[in-house]
Amino acid sequence: MDRVYIFDTTLRDGEQAPGFSMTTEEKLQMALQLAKLGVDVIEAGFAAASKGDFEAVSLIAKEVKGPVICSLARALEKDIELAGKALECAERKRIHTFIATSEIHMKYKLRMEPEEVLQRAKRAVEYARRFTDDVEFSCEDATRSQREFLYRVIETAIKAGATVINIPDTVGYTVPEEFADLIEGIRNNVPNIDKAIISVHCHDDLGMAVANSLMAVKHGARQVECTINGIGERAGNASLEEIVMALKVRKDFFGNLHTNVNTKELYRTSRLLCRITGSFVQPNKAVVGDNAFAHESGIHQHGVLANPLTYEIMSPDDVGFPSTRIVLGKHSGRHALKSKLREMGFEFSEEDIDRIFEKFKALADKKKEVYEEDIEALVYEEFLKHEEDEPIKVFHYQVQTGDKLLPTATVVLSFRGEERTASSTGNGPVDAIIRAIQKALGIEPKLLDFSIKALTPNTDAQAESRLVIELDGVRASGRGVDVDIIKASVSGFVDALNRAIVRKSYILSKESLRREGTI
């Protein structure tokens, strides 16, 4: 068997983590995306845990098609019966029953003798078979269990009808080499192990959940239990996206082992979980973190721009990630800045780029990240602003507004020396004056972003407006500051318009020169 089955337990083990609980509807939404992702099994919950969990398992069993729908159940008849009832409508269903097999768990948690545990496991699997032919049995805390006893429990569970045997590293205690030896031991010492699939479920308490899972797969396990973003009890579970991409990227090591997961849905699934739970993924998270395909170092940026394979072992498109992100900061080099300028529509001589780069470095030392708008401002101040006077100048304006008045604005301005006047109404005073300016100019740019904030907490504080517009395919940002929020808005809007108009003229002049063969 070369196929590795992906058993997703985001909705069960993942949801048990503090702060990750979900409503029934949210679980359904997540389950539908997991089905789209192409996981083989969805552990929808623990039907006996609560009325809400029972309802969630039942709803997912009814609505989600494709994956096997599974419910966890302790090795107790009442738990197994509730799991069976919750799964009644499932197209394909599995009951996952478990009992602890380590000495510490049997003595202090279960207060049972090993032989009692053995018989409980047998009865639980037999009872689960009354509801479905697909029964998974887990030896909780398997990695701290006495080997010979563990082999006996597994053999007994398979004889009773278990089709999947799960070997959990419940407390994240094992290490890869040790876990590989355990899987080999099970394969060599359980006589009927060929009648069941070996599964693994690793926790990340020592940061080795993914490594342990992959090593188990390398040595014969064919199901991995994991979660989106690695969420779960304590330090979490093995991360689904890391397991799947490791098998895909490192075929030279894992051979023909593969999953049926649609990797292009990984990023989307990760972000859906974040939205549902209100959590976030740390920026340096493998595969789906914001920095997974981001580069700030000049050396790295140069390499990636020349050939992505220099520093990216997988393509952003492989996991549905938006794109490689060149982050401009104090570690960035000239190649990255030059590439960004070209992307923004600017073409400069090497001498001019040196001037911009010097100012860029000075700015980068003051900021964590330099954005496109920052670069545009550098270029505008250094080159474009001096090529011609600002084409638009506002002489004065007047706004009438009130709770029972329709906001109305009149503006007097000049465009390339020609005076113009216009009036307009709007939803508010700012909307009215912006409409009046557009009417006077005879243009209507697309407003991409508009924000205004007080620079200090007092009522007489200066207001700062920031706008991003698009005019005939040219993007530009503007900024205005004044104690009057209307004036700050006017200044910011006119600033953005001037930049867009000058930049458009610059681009057109370059295109004309290029057509003439001058450049």
Image (cartoon, helix red, strand yellow):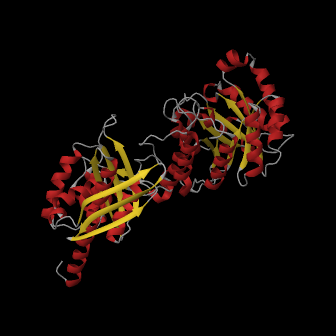
Question: In the image, residue 155 lies at what x, y percent?
Answer: 75, 34
* Residue 378 visible in the snapshot: yes
Residue drawn at (17%, 65%), measured in percent from left and top?
A: 389
* Residue 470 visible in the snapshot: no
**Residue farthest to the left, as pictured:** 351
Please state if 33 lies on the left or on the right of 407 as rendered. right
Question: In the image, residue 82 lies at what x, y percent?
Answer: 82, 35
Question: In the image, residue 484 lies at what x, y percent?
Answer: 31, 46
Q: Nearer the viewer, residue 360 or 463?
A: 463
Quadrant location of the C terminus? Answer: bottom left
**Residue farthest to the bottom, as pictured:** 516
Please state if 383 lies on the left or on the right of 9 as rendered. left
Q: Which of 94 and 293 is in front in this view?
A: 293
Q: Based on the displayed image, in which of its 4 quarters is residue 154 positioned?
A: top right
With respect to residue 68, does 342 lie above or below?
below
Residue drawn at (75%, 51%), measured in percent from left and top?
A: 63
Q: Which of 29 and 313 is in front in this view?
A: 29
With respect to residue 91, does 43 lie above or below?
above
With respect to residue 515, does 141 lie above or below?
above
With respect to residue 474, does 234 lie above or below?
above
Q: Nearer the viewer, residue 178 or 59?
A: 59
Residue drawn at (69%, 15%), measured in percent from left and top?
A: 107
Q: Based on the displayed image, in which of its 4 quarters is residue 390 positioned?
A: bottom left
Please state if 390 lies on the left or on the right of 315 as rendered. left
